Amino acid sequence: QSALTQPASVSGSPGQSITISCTGTSSDVGGYNYVSWYQQHPGKAPKLMIYEVSNRPSGVPDRFSGSKSGNTASLTISGLQAEDEADYYCSSYTSSSTHVFGGGTKLTVL
Amino acid sequence: EVQLVQSGAEVKKPGESLKISCKGSGYSFTSYWIGWVRQMPGKGLEWMGIIYPGDSDTRYSPSFQGQVTISADKSISTAYLQWSSLKASDTAMYYCARISLTETHDYWGQGTLVTVSS
């Protein structure tokens, strides 16, 4: 069970949009609409930002959106703000009835 | 309000045993899976395994099968993660999280820092 593949880092200026990809296989990302995204600030527990590919929990700004095509899911943050600077992780349910995380992406707001 | 409260930081020596806990409240503890996630210093999240407190059904990541034991005591709404013989490489922050009906880690504990050093 390999980790999902994410870019190590992305960056953007305030107000811009960025997209973080998350690539898996047909046994995880491609096989189920159970892809989630988490935000983690330094020293803090992860926070759920997107579930079931594109749904936002209550309280998460609509600047955060998710999508999926084939074996790749994506998180898009529009109107970047300084407080969005954090690590982002994707996760997926798998055909083994387990879960797997991506390696994580460090977002820098320039 | 859903809450997961984890036990405090631990400092142990290699070879020692350890059991850390995660107490759930504000929801039906027996109706949701609880998962454990490792984060080694400066590294990413690693999914370890899950337990369904209702019947103690347990699933492990292949990477952690045989290395740790996940259990739960539904009478006190608490899940556990335990080691029989710690190694220095077990040094990490460990998080518990509730798994929602949509296979999402929707609520997280505050984390338990485990340090293993001689």
Image: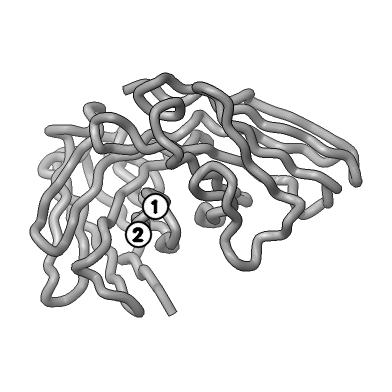
On the rendered structure, is A16 left or right of A31?
right
User: Amino acid type of disc 2?
Assistant: Arg
Q: Chain under label 2?
A: B
Measured as percent of width and height from the top left, residue B91 is found at 35, 41
The span from disc 2 to disc 1 (Cα, nearest Å) is 11 Å
Q: Are marks 2 and 1 in contact (CB under 8 Å)?
A: no
* Dot 1: chain letter: B
Q: Specify the quadrant of the image occupied by residue A26.
A: top left
Question: SS for tag 1?
Answer: loop
Residue B85 picture quarter: top left
Which residue is at a point 40% across and 74% down the rendered structure image? Answer: B2
Give the residue drawn at x 30%, y 51%: B35
* Residue hosting label 1: B102
Q: Relative to the observer, which residue lies in front, B102 or B87?
A: B102
Please state, as top left, top right, bottom left or bottom right, where the N terminus of chain A lies in the image.
Answer: top left
Question: Which residue position holds label 2?
Answer: B98
Foreground residue among A32 and B42: A32
- Kindly state the secondary structure of the residue where label 2 is placed: strand
Image spot of residue A51 (x, y percent): 51, 49
Q: Nearer the viewer, residue A19 or B97?
A: A19
Left or right of B42 in this view: B99: left
For the image, the number of numbered tags is 2
Residue at the image point whose x is 69% and y is 28% from the top: A9
Mark 2 against mark 1, which lies toward the viewer? 1
